Amino acid sequence: MTDALGRVRSALVLGGGSEIALATLDRLAIRGLRRAVLLGRRPEVMREAARELASNDVEVITLPFDADAVDTHQAVIADAFARYGDFDLVLMTFGTLGDQATFESDPAAAGHAAITNYAGAVSSGMAAGVSLRAQGHGSLVVLSSVAGQRPRRDNYVYGSAKAGLDAFARGLGEALHGTGAHVMVVRPGFVRTKMTAGMKPRVFAQTADQVAASIVKGLDGGASVVWAPAPLRLMFMVLNILPQSIFRRLKA
């Protein structure tokens, strides 16, 4: 349960190797986080994260989790709640960016990326929702992307999956309204991480820690949607009404 000040004491991470998730846990550790359960398929990354979090007196448990194995998600997440809950926070941060040129030459690769980014997120999000509803409290934070706001030529496979995920998460939030559970959708812009290494940063590019700061602020305020950074909201209000002939010429 959260403490008397409403701060997160326990967290479950789906995508335990995510730099944004780990940066968020680092910030929460300073505020009193005491247990973090990391689920993912990169044990070496999660073990390193566990060592760092342990230095802040956070108990860390690492468990295997495959975002693509949708048939396993309900059992894995229910087991985590049963063994280590209750959780004040569930962070769903797994995903793959991929390469648009590769997708266009290998449609199967595009399909596999869509499974990870959308189908895997739907099945695990539904499972997390079931457990949060049953415990009657807690927040599910879903990492979406501004790439889902309007498709671009250079990342429309990734963007289309994030568009679907964004709609799913907002719908799940409506389904959980009144149960004590809460869903917060996070829409980062370009984030400087290992996943984007070598890519040219876009306008309003941020670090994982800056996105983590927005996540924590959003949780404190009970937000339903968080733009990271906030000016992206106004930027996309404009971009979404531009004629396609103008939009396709933009390089931002």
Image: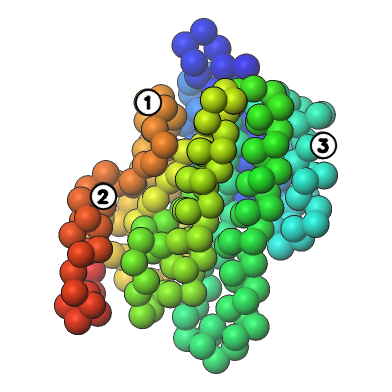
Q: Secondary structure at mark 3?
A: helix
Q: Secondary structure at mark 2?
A: helix
Q: How many marks?
A: 3
Q: Which of the 4 quarters of the picture holds residue 185?
A: top left
Q: Secondary structure at mark 1?
A: helix
First reached walking from the N terminus: tag 3 or tag 2: 3
- Of residues 124 and 102, the one nearer the viewer is 124
- Using the numbered discs, state the Cα–Cα distance from disc 3 to disc 1 in whole angstroms: 30 Å
- Using the numbered discs, state the Cα–Cα distance from disc 3 to disc 2 in whole angstroms: 37 Å
Determine the residue positioned at 75% across, 31% down. 81
Whether residue 154 is situated above or below residue 219 in the rendered picture: below
The image's mark for residue 79 is: 3
**Around disc 3, counting alpha carbons within 10 Å, would you say few (fewer than 14), some (14 to 19), or many (20 or more)?**
few
Residue 206, percent from left and from top: 33, 52
Q: Label 2: which residue?
A: 233
Whether residue 154 is situated above or below residue 18 in the rendered picture: below
**Lateral position of residue 186 relative to residue 41, left or right:** left
Residue 250, percent from left and from top: 21, 75
**Lateral position of residue 96 relative to residue 205, left or right:** right
- Of residues 103 and 198, the one nearer the viewer is 103
Name the amino acid type tagged 1. Gly
**The C terminus sits in image quarter:** bottom left
**The N terminus sits in image quarter:** top right
Residue 36 seen in the figure: no
First reached walking from the N terminus: tag 1 or tag 2: 1
The image's mark for residue 102 is: none
Determine the residue positioned at 57% across, 23% down. 180
Q: Which of the 4 quarters of the picture holds residue 196?
A: bottom left
Q: Label 1: which residue?
A: 221
Residue 114 seen in the figure: yes
**Around disc 2, counting alpha carbons within 10 Å, would you say few (fewer than 14), some (14 to 19), or many (20 or more)?**
some
Farthest residue toward the top? 4
